[in-house]
């Protein structure tokens, strides 16, 4: 019975195609590992505490010279947490926002927004951290930057989406996002100015992604696997008639047929308009031959 329960949990959590459970699992496992090593010191099983050195080496430093000494922090910093409430809050937020995101958009788009904002925020943090004088060296840790970008992207797409919150009732996603962004940005402004600048930038990035998507430009297509373009099909009118001339019964020319066939190869036959379907039908039923 327990085995069946574990299989159901695994299937419902990790085999849904969503990367959100994997991200949360890495964050939680690293959090537990850090404090497990610190527990060894508290129990006097090791001579020194590993908490501070591990966190420092895995977190993203605020200046370029320190970053060069630990470039892996560009990746690891997103998963480092040292406060229980922070990791709990961010994990729940990521889960909820991810659920809404996948209701309207797909996995490729989520990964693009998450990874691109993560890298953008990290680069800006190191850059501005090297320019802005800080009384003490600060560090960036946790997944708040990509979380903010994902939230900004989806709230720009469906600002009137409603959430039902405990003890509060139904509220619009736009209002929740504004309050969340304001508190996060204010807290970072008082404690870590380079992080505040990076946070503001990734929020704009998330909004920009959705505005571009609405205009027909999907930035996430850079993550799409390149497929070999199928051989172009050509409709040859007659035996000796040039393909750029119209048939005497006003058949479409070769350029128009090529455009329709290209559209089929990319988006499928169902993407054609009624006029395009009729054009292709007339061309293929007039004694012409189709070469692949």
Image (cartoon, rainbow, N blue to C red):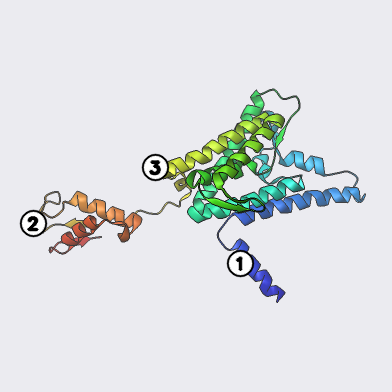
Q: Answer yes or no: do the residues labelled 3 and 1 have beta carbons within 8 Å?
A: no
Name above or below for residue 121 compared with residue 134: below
Q: Quadrant of the C terminus?
A: bottom left
Say which residue label 2 marks.
249
Say which residue label 1 marks.
11
- Mark 3: secondary structure: loop
Give the mark toward the camera: 3 or 1: 3
Instruction: Say which quarter of the image contains residue 264.
Output: bottom left
Residue 242 relative to residue 150: left or right: left
Residue drawn at point x = 62 percent, y = 29 percent? 127
- Mark 1: secondary structure: helix
Residue 220's spot in the image, x, y percent? 47, 46
For label 3, the crowd category at 10 Å Cα-Cα, with few meaning under 14, some 14 to 19 and many 20 or more, is: few
Residue 44's spot in the image, x, y percent? 93, 49
Instruction: Say which quarter of the image contains residue 77.
Output: top right
Residue 100's spot in the image, x, y percent? 54, 53
For label 2, the crowd category at 10 Å Cα-Cα, with few meaning under 14, some 14 to 19 and many 20 or more, is: few
Question: Which of these two is toward me, 121 or 99?
Answer: 99
Q: Answer yes or no: do the residues labelled 2 and 3 have beta carbons within 8 Å?
A: no
Residue drawn at point x = 73 percent, y = 50 percent? 30
Q: Which mark is residue 83?
A: none
Say which residue label 3 marks.
215
Residue drawn at point x = 84 percent, y = 48 percent? 38
Mark 2 and mark 3: span between their CA atoms? 39 Å
Tell which circle, 2 or 3, labels the residue nearer the N-terminal end.
3
Q: Quadrant of the N terminus?
A: bottom right
Name above or below for residue 60 compared with residue 161: above
């Amino acid at each position: 019975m327990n085995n069946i329960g574990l299989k159901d949990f695994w299937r419902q959590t990790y085999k849904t195609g969503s990367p959100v459970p994997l991200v949360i699992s890495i964050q939680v496992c690293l959090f537990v590992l850090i404090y497990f090593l610190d527990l060894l010191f508290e129990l006097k099983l090791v001579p020194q505490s590993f908490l501070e050195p591990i966190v420092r080496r895995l977190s993203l430093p605020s200046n370029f010279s320190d970053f060069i000494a630990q470039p892996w922090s560009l990746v690891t910093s997103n998963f480092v947490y040292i406060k229980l409430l922070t990791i709990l809050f961010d994990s729940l937020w990521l889960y909820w926002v991810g659920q809404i995101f996948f209701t309207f958009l797909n996995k490729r788009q989520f990964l693009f927004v998450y990874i691109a904002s993560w890298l953008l925020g990290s680069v800006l943090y190191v850059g501005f951290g090297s320019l802005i004088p800080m009384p003490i060296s600060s560090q960036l840790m946790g997944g708040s930057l990509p979380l903010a970008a994902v939230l900004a992207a989806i709230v720009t797409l469906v600002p009137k989406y409603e959430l039902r919150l405990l003890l509060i009732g139904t509220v619009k996603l736009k209002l929740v996002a504004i309050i969340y962004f304001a508190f996060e940005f204010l807290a970072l402004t008082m404690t870590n100015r380079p992080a505040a600048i990076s946070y503001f930038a990734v929020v704009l990035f998330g909004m920009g992604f959705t505005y571009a998507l609405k205009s027909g430009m999907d930035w996430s297509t850079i993550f799409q696997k390149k497929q070999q373009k199928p051989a172009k099909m050509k409709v040859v009118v007659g035996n000796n008639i040039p393909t750029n001339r119209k048939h005497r019964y006003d058949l479409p020319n070769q350029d128009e047929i090529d455009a329709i066939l290209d559209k089929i190869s990319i988006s499928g036959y169902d993407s054609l308009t009624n006029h395009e379907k009729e054009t292709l039908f007339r061309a293929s039923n007039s004694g012409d031959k189709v070469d692949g």
